[in-house]
Image: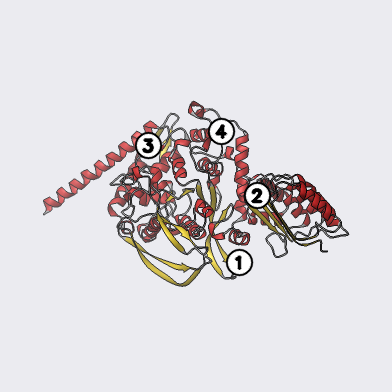
Amino acid sequence: RTTNEQQTNNKRTTNEQQTVNDKDNVIIRFAMKFPLTKDKIAAAFGCCCRLNEEDVELDPDCNEKWRRDAFKIFEAADWTEFNVGYTRTYYDIDRWGMRVGQEKTEFVDMSKPRKCSYSSKTDRDGIVKETTIIEAPTSLANSSNPPVEYRGITLYQLRAVWANIVRRCLPEGWKNRDGKPLTPEEVTLYDVDRYIIKPFTFEKRTSFIHALPSTAGPQPPHFFISHYWGNTIMGFIQCLEQAIQDYRVNCNDDHESRGGGMTADTPLWVCAYGDNQWALEDHIPDDPRETRFVKAMSIAKGRTISILDEEGTVFSRIWCMFQIFLTLMSSKGAMAEENSKNGFLSVYTTHTHIYRETDNSEEEERKAVGIILGGSTSDLGIFERICTRETSFPFKLIKKVLSIYVEKANASYEPDRIHILNALLGNTGDRINDNPPATHEKYVELNNKFWGSFASSATALQHAAREGGEGWIKMIEAFANGGMEGELRFNFNSNGAFGELTAAQATQLVAHLPPTIESLIIAEANYGVEFLEALIERVKQLHDMKELTIENTLVGGDGGGQQVGLRLAEILSTNTTIERLHLWNTDLIGTENVEQWGDALMKNDTMTELNLKLIGYA
C-alpha cells in the first residue's frame, strides 16, 4: 500500500512538472515572438516581469510561484457552478420593467448545452411572442472549436462566474495583484483571470467559453462589450442585468436593429472569456482592423455596450476608443466594409439610485444606469421615459468624457497606439506603422461624435445648464457637433425636462441644434422674440429635417408673434426637406400675416402635411 502511494505521488509530481514545462514553453514562445511590454505580459499571463531595452525577461521566481498557484487552483478548486449549476434569486418584471411580487429562487442547470436565443418578437410591454435561436453560419454550425469571434458568453454563464466568486473568494483567501485580501464585491477581471479562467481551462488549454459544458457550439454575439479589466465583476454584471431590462422590448424593425429582445440567453462578446488565454499570440495582428475585436463587432452588427468604471478609465484606453470609432463611424470611411451600418452605442455604469416610473410613479432601487443615443427599445421612443431612465447617470462621468481625445488615449504597448491611430486615418499595409500626425480632421470627427453621444442626452444638458458657465457652452457645442439623428423634443414647461433653463440658455440651446436631426418638437417655449428668431435661423440650417412642430408657444406683444411668423414663412417658401409642419396654440399666424403665409406655402413643393390648431390666439 505504501509503495502504491509513493508511486502515485511520484506520478503526480511528474505530471505536474510536465504541465509546468508545457506552460513554460507557451510563455517562452510568446515572449520571444513579440517584444511585449510588462503590462501586456502581465495582462496575458498574470505574472510579474522585468522590462529590458530589447525584450521582456520573465521574473523566474514570480513566474514559478504563479505556475504553482495556477496548478494548485486547477487541482483543488470546486467548479460546481460551471459543471453542475447554481442557484439564483430573482423577481418577476411588470410591463414597466419594475420588480414585482416576492423574491423567487431557481436552479440553473449548467451541465448540458444550452442554446443561445433572443426574443425576436414582443409586444410593447416586453411580453415575449416569439423566440429565435441564434445560430452561426452553416459552415460553423457543428464546430467544436469555433473562431474566437463566435465565442460569445451569455448572462446565464456570467452569473455562474459570479456564483463561483461568492462561494470561493473568502474561504480561499483570494488576493488582488497588490497582495491585498479580496471580498467578492472587489473581484475584477484580473482576479477572475487568475482564480477562474486560467485554472478552469488549465487542462484543456482552451477558451473559457469552450470549456463550459453549457456552451452549445458557436455563440454568435448579439452585442459587443467594451470594458476595462479593472471593473468589478459584480458591477459588470449589474450593468448587463439592467441592459437586459432596457432592451427587452422588440416589436418593430428599429428595435430589431438595435438589439431588442435581449435575454439572459443572448450572447455577448467579452474578450477574456472568448479568447484562449493559452494562445493569445494567435490573435495579435499589426492591423487592428484584422483583430478578433473587429470580427466580433461585425457579427454583433455594430451594437456596442460600453461598461464605464466610476473613474471613466475605459475611455482613456486606445483600444476602447478604437471600438467606439467602429461603433459610431461604422457606416463611413475605411471601416464600412468591416462593420455594420447600424452602429449603436450604449454606455452603462454602476450607480445605485432610486428610479421612479413615469406612468405610475412607482419607485425601486437600481444598481446601474445607461445612456443610449435615441433611447432603449423599452423606452418606445417616448422622450419622457428616456429622460427618466437616464437622469441618474453620474454627471461627473459625462463631464470627464468631454475631456477625452482619441489622439491622446493611452496604450500599454506603443505600437498598438500607432497602429490604431493609423487605422482611424484609413492607412493600410506598410502605412500602418507610419508615425501618426498629432492632429487630423478624422480625430475631430470622432471626438465630436463621441462627445455628442453624451451631450445629446437630456440629463447631460440639464446638469450642464444648472452649472452654467463654460461647462454649459462646451456641452451645447458638443451637442451641436455630435451628429444626432432622429427626433428631438424640448418641453420648456416648468415641470418639463428643460423647464429650469433661463431664456438665454434656451436661446443658446436652439441655436446649437444638431444639423442632422430629422424631427423637432418645441413645446411651452414662451421666451419671446429672441428665442423664436434663433430657432427660425437654426431651422434654415437643418438640411435633414422632415418634420417641425411648435406647440403651446407664444411670442406675445402687439403682433410680435405674427412678425416673427413671417420670417418662418419666408424660410419655408424655399425649404426642400420639411414635409410636415404642425403649429398648435401659437401666435405665429394671424389675420395680419395669413395671406403672406399662404403665398409662402404655395411656393413650397416639398410639404405634404400642414396641421394648424388654435392659431392666432393671444
Mark 3 vs mark 1, foreground winner is: 1
In this figure, which residue is indicated by the disc labeled 1?
358
Q: Amino acid at mark 4?
A: Leu
Say which label, 4 or 2, has the lower sequence index.
4
Q: Residues within 10 Å of mark 2 (few under 14, many from 20)?
A: many
Amino acid type, residue under disc 2 in the picture? Glu
Distance between the alpha carbons at the discs numbered 3 and 4: 26 Å
Q: Nearer the viewer, residue 14 or 209?
A: 209
Q: Amino acid at mark 3?
A: Asp
Disc nearer the start of the sequence (3/1) = 3
Q: Judge from the rendering whether residue 382 lies leftward or rightward of residue 601; answer left or right.
A: left
Distance from Cα at disc 3 to Cα at disc 1: 50 Å
The residue that appears at 43% across and 67% down in the rendered structure is 90
| Residue 427, percent from left and from top | 53, 30
Q: Residue at x 69, y 63 (%)?
A: 496
Give the mark nearest the N terminus, 3 or 4. 3
Q: In which quarter of the view is residue 214 placed?
A: bottom left
Select label 1 or label 4 by which is in front. Answer: 1
Q: Secondary structure at mark 2?
A: loop
State which tag comes first along the sequence, 1 or 4: 1
